[in-house]
Image (cartoon, helix red, strand yellow):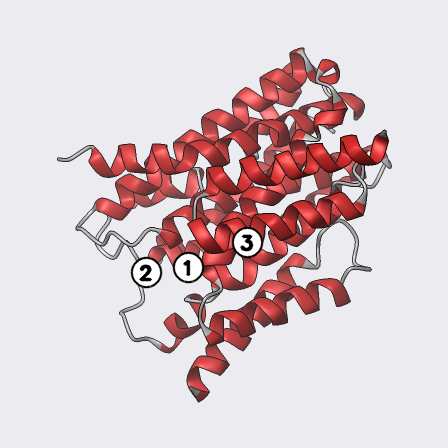
Amino acid sequence: MTWPTILAIGLATYLIRASFLFRRTERSGSPLERYLRYVPAAVLPILAVSATTSAVACPIETRLAAVAVGVAVAWKTRNVGAVMLVGMTVLWVLNAWAGS
Amino acid sequence: MSTAPLLRGVVAALPIAVSVVPFGMAAAVSAHQAGLSVIGTLGMSSVIFAGAAQLTALELSRMNAPTVVIIGAAIIVNLRFALYSAALARRIPDQPVPIRAAMASVLTDQAYALSAADDDPGPGHSVRFYFGAACTFWIAWQLGTLLGIFVGASVPADLHLGFSAALAFVALAVPAVRTRPALAAAVTSVTVYFLASSLPYGMGILPAAISGVIAGGLVEGTA
């Protein structure tokens, strides 16, 4: 991949990031706001799913178990560090157990 | 001017930043495999600063795809940032253009997710919280890139450190899905994402996200 390609992607990415931040803000109560409120609910689960399915070096069963425990910990604590720590521990223990 | 919101942003970002580092390492290792120099790899992580797009572009580059396809694919993968940009703009009605320009330059999935979940609406607070979090992720990403360049292959693969990114997103996603319309948004987007899984290189994210957002708004309208 060449520098012109890197710079072109970088510039395009910046323009996308800046797009709406450079517009005068919608007033509260605009119809658009009702939809934008659901951006996190729509996008974050997809990012979780895609990061889970793409980690192919690890057996799918242990990944799903780690995610299931992670969901439970997140539901109870809303603590990101706790979710990651407990989830990774589940992953390592199950992998070690499956590998032996 | 209080620095407390800035520090709160840094502290909230730290555990997630731990998952950003292996992601940055993966991007650097992938760049090396695609034949990029050390300077090219560092340049990519600082100029593009978007993991999914970098990995997509590198994968296509390794397959000798035409330049226009590489750039187009990276753009499609990054179009989700326009949604974040729109949602973020609502929270900062009075910020001047230089601040908005700086916010855009460090906008990532993680920075958006954290600031969306932060409910301290003090004047200017959300901007400082955002910068605290977003700059922490920027540092973690560049650190990951450096580690990938210099120690990349020597980290034991058995640790599956890259999987911690999945758990970080799980931790952010669960609290975002606590109301009925939010649940509708999540179920719709994940369903469309799976239906679109035949699209190459994560490009299903965009149609999935848009249909989820529409579903959430529609269900709220019927409540």
Secondary structure type for disc 3: helix
**Position of residue B53 measured from the top left corner of the image (x, y, whole percent):** 65, 42
**Position of residue B77 measured from the top left corner of the image (x, y, whole percent):** 64, 50
Question: Looking at the rendering, in which quadrant would you find the N terminus of chain A?
Answer: top right
Taking the spot 49% from the left edge, 36% from the top edge, the residue there is B16
Secondary structure type for disc 2: loop
Q: Which residue is mark 2?
A: B90
Q: Amino acid at mark 2?
A: Arg
Between residues A79 and B151, which one lies in front from this camera angle?
Answer: A79
Q: Residue furthest bottom?
A: B222
**Residues at marks 1 and 3 touching, judged by CB atoms closer than 8 Å:** no
Question: Looking at the rendering, in which quadrant would you find the C terminus of chain A?
Answer: top right
Q: Which residue is mark 1?
A: B86
Q: Amino acid at mark 3?
A: Ala
Query: CA separation, marks 3 and 2?
Result: 31 Å
Label ID, residue A72: 3
**Residues at marks 2 and 1 touching, judged by CB atoms closer than 8 Å:** yes
Chain identity of mark 3: A
**Residues at marks 3 and 2 touching, judged by CB atoms closer than 8 Å:** no
Between residues B175 and B8, which one lies in front from this camera angle?
Answer: B175
Residue B56 position (above or below residue B139): below
Question: Is label 1 on the same chain as label 3?
Answer: no
Whether residue B194 is visible, yes or no, is yes
Whether residue B98 is visible, yes or no, is no
Query: CA separation, marks 2 and 1?
Result: 7 Å
Q: Is residue B171 left or right of residue B2?
A: right
Residue B223 position (above or below residue B203): below
Question: Is label 2 on the same chain as label 1?
Answer: yes
Chain identity of mark 2: B
